[in-house]
Amino acid sequence: MTDTSLDRSAADTSAVDFIAIDGPAGSGKSSVSKAVARRLGFGYLDTGSAYRALAWHVLDRGADTADADAVLAAASDFPVRLGLDPDDRTVRVGDVDITDEIREPRVSGAVSGVARVPAVRAQVNDLFRSLVAEAPYPAVVVEGRDITTVVAPDAPVRILLTAAPEVRAARRAGELSGENADAVAAALHKRDASDSAVVDFLNAADGVEIVDSTELDFPQTIDAVLTVIERLRGAHRG
Ligand SMILES: Nc1ncnc2c1ncn2[C@@H]1O[C@H](COP(=O)(O)OP(=O)(O)OP(=O)(O)O)[C@@H](O)[C@H]1O
Ligand SMILES: Nc1ccn([C@@H]2O[C@H](COP(=O)(O)O)[C@@H](O)[C@H]2O)c(=O)n1
């Protein structure tokens, strides 16, 4: 695991390629990106886990993520530790392992509050660029909401991974078997509505390839993404 802190400055240049993947909640970004990274021997960066870790940190301090000042105060003392190994999704704040806690509904329901604070976005984006620049991999699959547009708009590979809203909600409900399916769908759509007011991950920016998995199963989606990566990396190398 790489030990990081958010006050590291962004690297100016990097020999490590970004494979940038954005998409709405439940579109398969994490599962597909991880599988692709494993297949290609690349690193994997789940940028949402940094936002989730900060939301957890705010709640842990007894504060509310709707309070931007409280979010900024928490962000100024936020020793988050993320790794790039696709087989190790451990997330820590300081020495506290919060890997499972950041997936709980209370964090998912609070995370959009931290994501809408511009200074937080700038801070975590610097962290993401530093992690990729120093990565011991030829490329890192970086997934989130604004990777193709803000974090790495010049990446050789930029993909918007999407699926119909009802398909995404059903897949997410399938993961959370104890939860009410309607409530899971409502929470997912509420988070997308809130997040898409901050960054646009529902429409592909110029040059971004769309992979729509509505009619694809999981292995077919991985293959579709691998095909795009192979084509765009080949074109980029010339
Ligand atoms: N093409 C597919 N066919 C069937 N299931 C899929 C497909 N793609 C992803 N899934 C499943 O959908 C669920 C949601 O995927 P995942 O967690 O990767 O989405 P995500 O975009 O990272 O979501 P979030 O942004 O909320 O973290 C997982 O259970 C995953 O295995
Ligand atoms: N590039 C990103 C990534 C994530 N967010 C915010 O984090 C939340 C959790 O992300 P998941 O991918 O784990 O679902 C997400 O709902 C956004 O609020 C972001 O803003 N930008």
Image: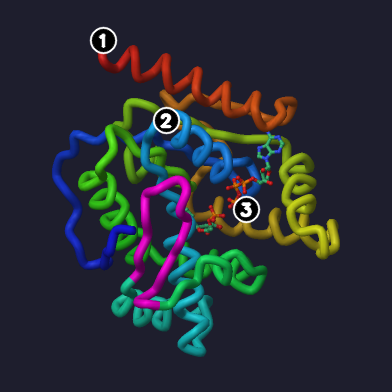
Furthest-left residue in this view = 12
Label whose residue precedes the other's in the sequence (1 or 2): 2
Q: Residues within 10 Å of mark 1 (few under 14, many from 20)?
A: few
Q: Which residue is mark 2?
A: 158
Q: Secondary structure at mark 2?
A: strand
Q: Looking at the figure, which quarter contains the C terminus?
A: top left
- Amino acid type at image mark 2: Arg
Q: Mark 3 vs ligand 2: CB under 8 Å?
A: yes
User: On the rendered image, what quadrant is the N terminus found in?
Assistant: bottom left
Please report the residue visible at 25 percent of the width from the left and 42 percent of the height from the top: 136
Asked if disc 3 and disc 2 are in contact, CB closer than 8 Å, the reply is no
Label 3: how many Cα within 10 Å (few below 14, some 14–19, many 20+): some
Residue range in magenta is: 80-95
Q: Earlier in the sequence, mark 3 or mark 2?
A: 2
Q: In this rendering, would 96 be left or right of 181?
A: left
Residue matched to label 3? 192
Q: Is residue 10 magenta?
A: no
Viewer-closest of 150 and 83: 83
Spatial CA distance of label 1 from label 2 is 17 Å
Give the camera-side residue of 128 and 200: 128
Pair 1/3: label in front: 1
- The amino acid sitting under disc 3 is Asp
Q: From what the image shows, is residue 129 above or below residue 155?
A: below
Report the mark closest to the observer, 3 or 2: 2
User: For the point 63% across and 54% down, which residue is it?
Assistant: 193
